[in-house]
Image (spheres, rainbow, N blue to C red):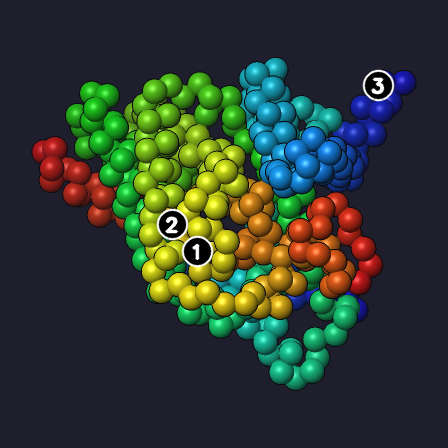
Amino acid sequence: MTIFGVALLALCTLIGVFLGDLLGVALGVKANVGGVGLAMILLIAARAWLLARGKLGGGIKLGVEFWSTMYIPIVVAMAAQQNVVAAVRGGPIVLIAATVSLLLCFACVALLGHFGRRERAEDAQIRHGGAVIGGDLDDDAAPVAPPHAVRKA
Amino acid sequence: MLHMIEHVFVEQSLVAAFAVVGGLMLISNFAGRRLTGGRVHGSAIAIVLGLVLAYIAGLYTGGKKGVADLPVFAGIGLMGGAMLRDFAIVATAFEVEVVEARRAGFLGVLALALGTVIPFIVGALTAVAFGYTDAVSITTIGAGAVTYIVGPVTGAALGADSAVMALSIATGVTKAVMVMVGTPLVAKLIGLDNPRSAMAFGGLMGTVSGVAGGLAATDPKLVPYGALTATFHTGIGCLVGPSLFYLTVRAIVG
């Protein structure tokens, strides 16, 4: 059933965020430390566990993957509620601090990305992931398919 | 008539948000294919469009939450809020290729360290260049350059001035917006086309909203790898900002 997938996702998120809060308290930080990242690791583990037992049914997959396909629209909604006015009006100190740190970090991505990089054919799993997060549940669709068409799995 | 439509939008806020964002995506995909010949990803256009709408709405309402400050679009606030955003980010982990992610684990940790230290130093130096001399203000502005959550958390812990806090938040928000818009533009140049570099990217850029938006606009398959490291960024920043970074700055400026 689809709800099992959605519930699994919810459970992983709740446990992850709770662990992140605990970690924050343990470190004496007024913030959640990596809650979402921990939740992601939990979901990866749950997927592997279900797969190994042959219990990863279509319903569970649909329940989780639906929310992956909703990722981009949710990010668009997120963009639409940023405090862009504050960013635009920040003045030179804000602009300089943001731009310079951004450029340095982009340079570091280029540097770290090359470090230990091997050229190899792209994995099917990665390609499938791209199609799903791009908004398409259909396996046969090209990964660059426009992300508006959510078809039935 | 108009009043009744408005009433439906207010009452069905989340449902209305689905319809509005769906429309926005439709327009963006059309524009991406027809106007740019497929060179610009539809989602990149949609994100920029969202930011532009947030700017216009912010000017109109004077609020801080962009479009979501308009009652008819309150549902956008729920749909794009931290709860559903994190839910969708976790869901993308279902698509992660575990071997690839584990192999890049050390790279991710290294990126996290660099991504916290570099923006802090840049932010702190900028603050000094603009005449700030006290350790609290310098640390708060530096922390803002890490992410827009680290800034105010650090500032609140150190008891920073509210004007400095505002500056710190604005720095973080500006960085997030720039990451969203800038990433697809520089992706090729910095080799951001595989899970490894996406994990480095997530750790270095930090800001979850920036990484989420930037990778979505660049290549959806990279999203979970970037998100995996980025979500640790704010917590680590909040950990070292008011402690290690503050003590270091205080030791230097006296």
Mark 1, Cα crowd under 10 Å, few <14 / some 14-19 / many 20+, is many
Q: Name the residue: 71% across, 67% down.
A: A61
Q: Chain of mark 1?
A: B
Location of the C terminus of chain B (image quadrant): top left
A141 in relation to B6, above or below: below
Q: Identify the residue at the far bottom of this view.
A: A53
Give the class, few, some or many, for how many residues have Cα within 10 Å of label 2's Cα (few <14, many ≥20).
many
Q: Element under label 2?
A: helix
Q: Which residue is identified by label 3?
A: B3
| Mark 3 or mark 2, whichever is nearer to me | 2
* Nearer to us in this view, A116 or A134: A116
Q: A120 or B211, which is in the foreground?
A: A120
Where residue A46 sits, quadrant-wise, is bottom right
Name the amino acid type tagged 2: Val
Q: Does the rendering let one see residue B31?
A: yes
Circle 1: residue type:
Ser
- Identified by mark 3, the residue type is His
Q: Chain of mark 2?
A: A
Q: Chain of mark 3?
A: B
Specify whether disc 3 shares its chain with disc 2.
no
The correct choice, above or below, for B221 with respect to B189 in the image is below
**Helix, strand or loop at mark 1:** helix
Q: In the rendered view, tell whether residue A68 sits above or below residue A41.
A: above
Q: Which residue, as the protein is rendered here, is positioned at the far right?
A: B1
Numbered mark located on residue B197 in the image = 1
Residue A28 lies, in percent from the top left, at 32, 53
